[in-house]
Image: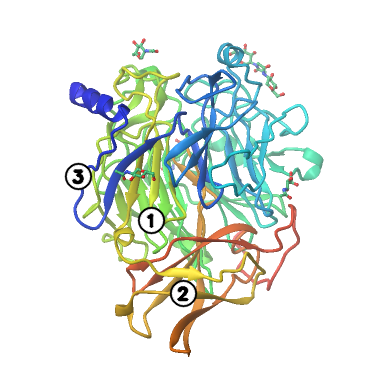
């Protein structure tokens, strides 16, 4: 096995693009390399994915005579462009703000590596990437000067999402170098731009969830409160009232925060009620606090997916448990424009990180890669929601520090994997630079084409776009319109990801023999249902023809914090 993998690796490193086995419908193609380890990944323009690495992995992509630790990956040419990053971005978090600017927060400082790469201490860094639409990224800049702009406290392994006023909430992390568990746990929240004059807010929830509480999974709910999962603890945090309301623990002793990385996602939100539901998958039932040296890379991960409806009745009912077709440590879960979710990456056994357990494989604390994704259909009945049928199988392990994102074209970009302290090309679970492109069946069909999409729309407003679609759809096909945040991928959490369905009415006009199809769409009622900022519109026609994504700014496009906008709704009190 290792030797087969090794020769495959050499073939692929030689720059040969290969198609791997797939059943008709979905396809998986390897094409392109990232040049840095894609430890974090976010789509920042119609053609670019921004990636961050550790300062010191020592990958092949160079800048200023040294290995780069930031890159803009060109989705059209499948090539990376090195980005000049000043501070160490290792295990930072990030999101896009209400004005379209991408912000990366927190990171690392490993003295020896940082000196070798002249990286600055990134533990409290706030890095700013202003919107940049140069197709190949040439000249796009990252502002990174922790001495000038920084968080209140150092945070390594924090998590961050965009909230109702377009700022970021930044949660938890480690205030000093932690090995495996969070031993220097920063049990607090802060915001960027800052609230409370920069004071941090202490969190009993993070304290309870520790020491496996890093990269808290969290979601902006449609009333503006935040649902959080860390360890097996869950709360609703009310930012305005500054209250934590305890909700039911994840069932059956399953935990999903780092270093016990499972994943979680907010299911698509539908008008008119936008009832939020969250699903949490994978992780482990291992008791937190057991010394890593007493844990094994062969310990089975959890196959559990638990789902909760965040209404008074839903909370009373609690988590409904199902099982994936496989166990998963280090999976990631993200939306398709058609409303299903993809569960991908990770292994079937072990834990996050490297060189921690008594029997690492290579250096990996996890083993038995999951080479085939699972599709989760939220609208199906319990027990029938998950399937691997027709999904392609890769031959590239995507273990710790791997990432995935939906792209504007509608295919998924899969990158990264490095359960090693720095670049290691010879070990089992070597540093992975190869990119894979996973295409849902719609990528091989005729694509609907969107035109006249406005650049910016207000909340609770009707607007129109034009659409052309295949002849065979007839005059009155079913239409589903997804408004999506494509999220920020890191550590098995796709932060800020969101899908909100838009009400849509199709009409056709014939002018000089030329037929035009117009979609009348309604934006979400307010800034709490879709936090203000960049969104991508994808249209699905007749359930199978899916357009590429069109970028649109939702809200005023103003810098955070922005005022409440649109029509406010009333919600039952959960917190
Ligand atoms: C790989 O990507 C490049 C750039 O988009 C493209 O020209 C080439 O055809 C692709 N190769 C395969 C095998 O898909
Ligand atoms: C890195 O910066 C943080 C925040 O200022 C500071 O607390 C920490 O001591 C620094 N680390 C080192 C090794 O200098
Ligand atoms: C951070 O960790 C280092 C190494 O374990 C230790 O020497 C130092 O005292 C710690 N700093 C704080 C503020 O806890
Ligand atoms: C959550 O974790 C704590 C600490 O390990 C444990 O005592 C508790 O039973 C767990 N809750 C559930 C529902 O498994
Ligand atoms: C890669 O990892 C193996 C296993 O720990 C180790 O023996 C080897 O020295 C590492 N190589 C590099 C370049 O660090
Ligand atoms: C967006 O807002 C942030 C925070 O105020 C600011 O740093 C950034 O420059 C703004 N970007 C634009 C394009 O206005």
Relative side of 425 to 184, left or right: left
**Above or below 104: residue 317:** below
Q: Residue at x 22, y 24 (%)?
A: 7
State the CA–CA distance, disc 1 to disc 2. 25 Å
Q: Position of residue 459 (x, y in %)?
A: 65, 70
Cβ atoms under marks 1 and 2 closer than 8 Å? no
Question: Which mark sits nearer the N-terminus, 3 or 2?
Answer: 3
Q: Residue at x 20, y 56 (%)?
A: 24
The residue that disc 1 covers is 341
**Above or below 347: residue 88:** above
Question: Which mark sits nearer the N-terminus, 1 or 2?
Answer: 1
User: How many residues crowd around disc 1 within 10 Å: few (fewer than 14), some, or many (20 or more)?
Assistant: many
On-image quarter of the N terminus: top left
Asked if residue 323 shows in the view, the reply is no
On-image quarter of the C terminus: bottom right
Relative side of 87 to 274, left or right: right
The residue that disc 2 covers is 467
User: How many residues crowd around disc 3 within 10 Å: few (fewer than 14), some, or many (20 or more)?
Assistant: some
Q: Position of residue 510 (x, y in %)?
A: 46, 89
Q: Residue furthest front?
A: 512
**Element assignment for label 2:** strand
């Amino acid at each position: 096995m290792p030797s087969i993998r090794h020769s495959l690796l050499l073939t692929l490193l030689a720059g040969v693009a290969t198609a791997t086995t797939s059943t008709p419908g979905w396809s998986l193609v390897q094409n392109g390399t990232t040049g840095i380890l894609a430890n974090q990944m976010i789509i920042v323009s119609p053609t670019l994915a921004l990636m961050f690495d550790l300062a010191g992995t020592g990958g092949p992509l160079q800048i200023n005579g040294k290995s780069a630790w930031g890159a803009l990956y060109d989705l059209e040419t499948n090539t990376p462009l090195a980005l000049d990053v000043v501070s160490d971005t290792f295990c930072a978090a990030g999101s896009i703000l209400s004005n379209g600017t991408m912000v990366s927060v927190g990171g690392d400082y490993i003295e020896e590596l940082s000196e070798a790469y002249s990286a600055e201490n990134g533990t409290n860094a706030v890095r700013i990437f202003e919107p940049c639409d140069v197709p190949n990224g040439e000249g796009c800049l990252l502002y990174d000067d922790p001495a000038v702009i920084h968080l209140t406290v150092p945070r390594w392994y924090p998590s961050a999402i965009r909230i109702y006023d377009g700022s970021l909430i930044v949660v938890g992390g480690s205030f000093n170098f932690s090995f495996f568990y969070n031993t220097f746990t920063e049990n607090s929240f802060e915001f960027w731009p800052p609230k409370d004059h920069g004071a941090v807010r202490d969190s009993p929830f993070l304290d309870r969830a520790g020491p496996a509480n890093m990269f808290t999974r969290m979601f902006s709910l449609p009333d503006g409160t935040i649902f959080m999962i860390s360890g097996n603890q869950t709360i609703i945090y009310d930012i305005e009232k500054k209250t934590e309301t305890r909700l039911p623990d994840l069932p059956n002793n399953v935990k999903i925060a780092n270093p016990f990385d499972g994943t979680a996602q907010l299911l698509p939100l539908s008008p008119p009620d936008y009832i939020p539901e969250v699903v949490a998958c994978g992780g482990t039932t291992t008791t937190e606090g057991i010394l890593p040296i007493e844990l094994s890379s062969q310990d089975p991960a959890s196959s559990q997916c638990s789902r909760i409806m965040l209404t008074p009745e839903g909370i009373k009912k609690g988590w409904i448990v199902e099982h994936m077709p496989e166990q998963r440590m280090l999976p990631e879960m993200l939306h398709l424009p058609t409303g299903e979710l993809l569960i991908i990456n990770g292994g079937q056994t072990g834990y996050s990180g490297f060189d921690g357990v008594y029997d690492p494989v290579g250096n990996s604390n996890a083993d038995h890669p999951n080479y085939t994704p699972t599709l989760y259909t939220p609208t199906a009945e319990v027990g029938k929601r998950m399937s691997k049928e027709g999904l392609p199988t890769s031959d590239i392990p995507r273990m710790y520090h791997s990432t995935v994102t939906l792209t504007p074209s509608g295919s998924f970009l899969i990158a990264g994997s490095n359960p090693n302290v720095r670049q290691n090309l010879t070990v089992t679970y070597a540093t992975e630079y190869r990119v894979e492109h996973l295409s849902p069946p719609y990528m091989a069909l005729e694509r609907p084409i969107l035109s006249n999409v406005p650049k910016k729309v207000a909340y609770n407003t009707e607007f129109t776009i034009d659409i052309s679609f295949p002849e065979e759809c007839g005059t009155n096909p079913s239409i589903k319109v997804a408004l999506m945040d494509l999220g920020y991928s890191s550590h098995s959490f796709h932060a800020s990801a969101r899908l909100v369905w838009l009400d849509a009415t199709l009409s056709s006009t014939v002018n000089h023999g030329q037929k035009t199809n117009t979609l009348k769409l309604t934006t979400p009622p307010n800034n709490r249902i879709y936090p203000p900022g960049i969104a991508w519109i994808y249209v699905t026609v007749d359930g199978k023809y899916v357009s590429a994504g069109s970028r649109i700014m939702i809200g005023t496009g103003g810098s955070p914090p922005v005022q409440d906008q649109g029509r406010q709704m009333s919600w039952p009190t959960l917190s």
